[in-house]
Image (cartoon, grey):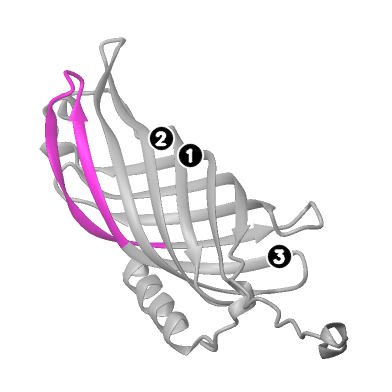
Amino acid sequence: MKQNKLYVLLIAALITAPAHADENSQFSYFGVGIAGSNFSVNKSANSPLTTATSINSNSTNLNIFAGWQLDSFLGMELDYLNGGAVTATSQGQTTKVFDTEMTTIAATMGTPLNDSIRVYAKLGGTFWKFHSQQNVDLNNGFGSSLGLGADINFYGGSERKLRIEYNNYRLDNVYVKNANSLSINAVFSFPDTPNKPAAMTTTNSEEYKL
């Protein structure tokens, strides 16, 4: 129920946020960072987990993303999260049950709090895939996702920022019910510079007089 309320509040925020465009705020960006992830595992669907004495569903992931800011508030983003693994320990032996791969496409909506901090929300969909220890595909599909984050400007310019972001993913509800990640990232921006019309030149007719 809590996750459903988060989705409702996020959708309401996206709808009610200001939506006027600012052409000067358009830019593309990419980022890379480290994420800590947690997976809500369904033990009954994973035979190695039913007899395990302990389960580790926390992992460290590589996070890579790129996006385009359409105006001051609205943007689009593509995010790739890889490396999350679920392990089980039984009779003193630890085995990797499966690892995960998630690619997310999301709309972003944000607003600056001040000159240094901009907060935003993300709503999108995630393509996920689970691999077994033998690198065999266990399951794959598509589910919804939401995120909340902040871009922090420590450098005095707009080209580099620190990003802290939380994401929740709805997965297959068979192997994994849902997943959460908290990441810290470096963001590099590239402002779009529209082509300006060439300045009109005037000819001084006096130069052609004899």
Q: Earlier in the sequence, mark 1 or mark 3?
A: 1
What is the x, y in percent for residue 163? 61, 52
Would residue 144 be counted in the magenta stretch?
yes
Reading the image, the residue beneath label 3 is 117
Reading the image, the residue beneath label 2 is 58
On-image quarter of the C terminus: bottom right
Q: Amino acid at mark 3?
A: Ile
**Nearest to the observer: residue 114 or residue 201:** 201
> In this image, 95 relative to 13: left or right?
left
Q: Disc 3 to disc 2, how far (Cα)? A: 29 Å
Q: Are marks 2 and 1 in contact (CB under 8 Å)?
A: yes
Q: Earlier in the sequence, mark 2 or mark 1?
A: 1
What is the x, y in percent for residue 124? 33, 65
The boundaries of the magenta stretch are: 125-146
> In this image, 58 relative to 208: left or right?
left
Q: Residue at x 55, y 85 (%)?
A: 21
